[in-house]
Image: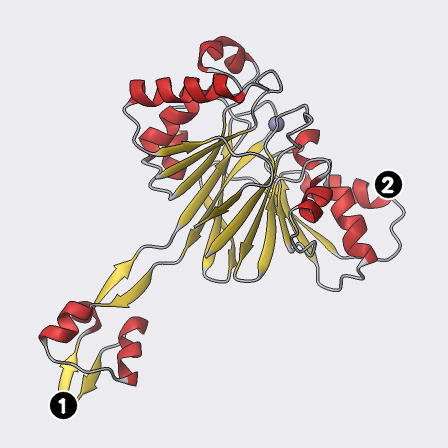
């Protein structure tokens, strides 16, 4: 299961209510951040989450998405963190982290491991427990990465078939879930016949990108799509010139991707009145024929997949 908290839902300028972008995810006891804007570590404290972060995935090195990394490293250092912290990000992430580590005088030598990425087509970058993390380049003013986290598919027992063939509970049955055939009371059971594939849950995070007809492919069939909606739907031209998305463009990507639930984040500071964007999203949903639930999360809101 993935448990998440929106630590920051603002865009370039934080507001009184919205922090710079960051999403905290816990996956089977491993903690990771998607982006790490200024003030992320304080948001972690406010949310009552463990500050012991194992992975940081940076979309790009604009300050609003990365100014908080120094703070996280400072705190982990003071906690005498022994395990390394892995920082994924665009090409050049190694040099940038090197500068950062040289700029500040940290007390001890925490191990920060840079993982620079370039993914013209989507690629698997790491496996965390039963989940795989994929990356792809998206189009922005600087190199920017989209991330997708997907649980592995698993085999589950077909209770209807077990009943039909009168097979009683047996410890051997768990081997069917491992993709192995078993023999019980002289009867051979094929895993193909007695199991079904349960699809792994998935989440995609796409922020700071301009609209493209292809980007939806990366988020195809996700359970949760977290996507930027920096501007209202009437500001297509402005959004295009800043290489950002409008509410309607984000929902169009969600519709084409067949996302089940959509969280719109990275909203411009000009929309302090959330009703404007909500009404905008309702109109865009109707226009696009989008059935998915659409949410504008507030800072510290939770999500669960
Ligand atoms: Zn941004």
The quadrant in which residue 172 appears is: bottom left
**In the rendering, at what x and y percent does residue 60 appear?**
62, 34
Q: Which mark is residue 60?
A: none
The quadrant in which residue 221 appears is: top left
Indicate left or right for 56 with 71 as reference: left
Rendered residue at 66%/32% (across/down): 20
Furthest residue in direction left, as rendered:
164
**In the rendering, at what x and y percent does residue 38 appear?**
72, 35
Indicate left or right for 119 with 57 as reference: left
Q: Are marks 1 and 2 in contact (CB under 8 Å)?
A: no
Residue 42 sits above or below residue 163 on the image: above
Give the position of the N terminus as an image quadrant.
bottom left
Q: Is residue 267 visible?
A: yes
Rendered residue at 41%/48% (across/down): 202
Indicate left or right for 272 with 168 as reference: right
Give the residue at mark 1: 186
- For ligand 1, the image quadrant comes to top right
Q: Bin the neighbour count of mark 1 within 10 Å (Cα to Cα): few under 14, some 14-19, many 20 and up.
A: few
Give the residue at mark 2: 103
Rendered residue at 46%/46% (across/down): 123
- Front-lying residue, 286 or 228: 286
């Amino acid at each position: 299961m993935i448990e998440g908290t929106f630590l920051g839902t603002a865009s370039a300028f934080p507001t009184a209510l919205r922090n710079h972008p960051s999403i905290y995810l816990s996956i089977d006891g491993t903690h990771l951040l998607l982006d790490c804007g200024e003030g992320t570590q304080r948001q972690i404290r406010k949310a009552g989450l463990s500050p012991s972060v194992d992975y940081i995935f940076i979309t790009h090195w604009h300050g609003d998405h990365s100014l908080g990394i120094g703070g996280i490293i400072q705190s982990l250092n003071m906690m005498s963190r022994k395990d390394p912290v892995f920082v994924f990000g665009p090409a050049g992430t190694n040099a940038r982290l090197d500068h950062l580590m040289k700029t500040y005088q940290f007390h001890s030598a925490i191990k920060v491991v840079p993982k620079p990425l370039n993914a013209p087509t989507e690629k698997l970058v790491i496996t965390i427990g039963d989940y795989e993390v994929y990356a792809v380049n998206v189009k922005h003013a600087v190199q920017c990465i989209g991330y997708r986290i997907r649980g592995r598919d698993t085999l589950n027992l077909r209770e209807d078939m077990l009943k039909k063939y009168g097979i009683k509970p047996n410890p051997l049955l768990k081997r069917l879930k491992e993709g192995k055939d078993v023999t019980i009371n002289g009867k051979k059971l094929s895993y193909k016949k007695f199991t079904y594939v349960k699809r792994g849950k998935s989440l995609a995070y796409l922020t700071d990108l301009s609209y493209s007809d292809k980007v939806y492919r990366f988020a195809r069939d996700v359970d949760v799509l977290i996507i930027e909606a920096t501007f209202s739907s009437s500001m297509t031209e402005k959004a295009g010139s800043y290489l950002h998305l409008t509410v309607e463009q984000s929902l169009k990507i969600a519709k084409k991707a067949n996302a089940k639930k959509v969280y719109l984040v990275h909203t411009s500071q000009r929309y302090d009145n959330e009703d404007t964007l909500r009404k905008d999203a309702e109109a865009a949903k109707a226009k696009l024929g989008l059935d998915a639930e659409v949410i504008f999360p507030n800072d510290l809101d939770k999500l669960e997949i």
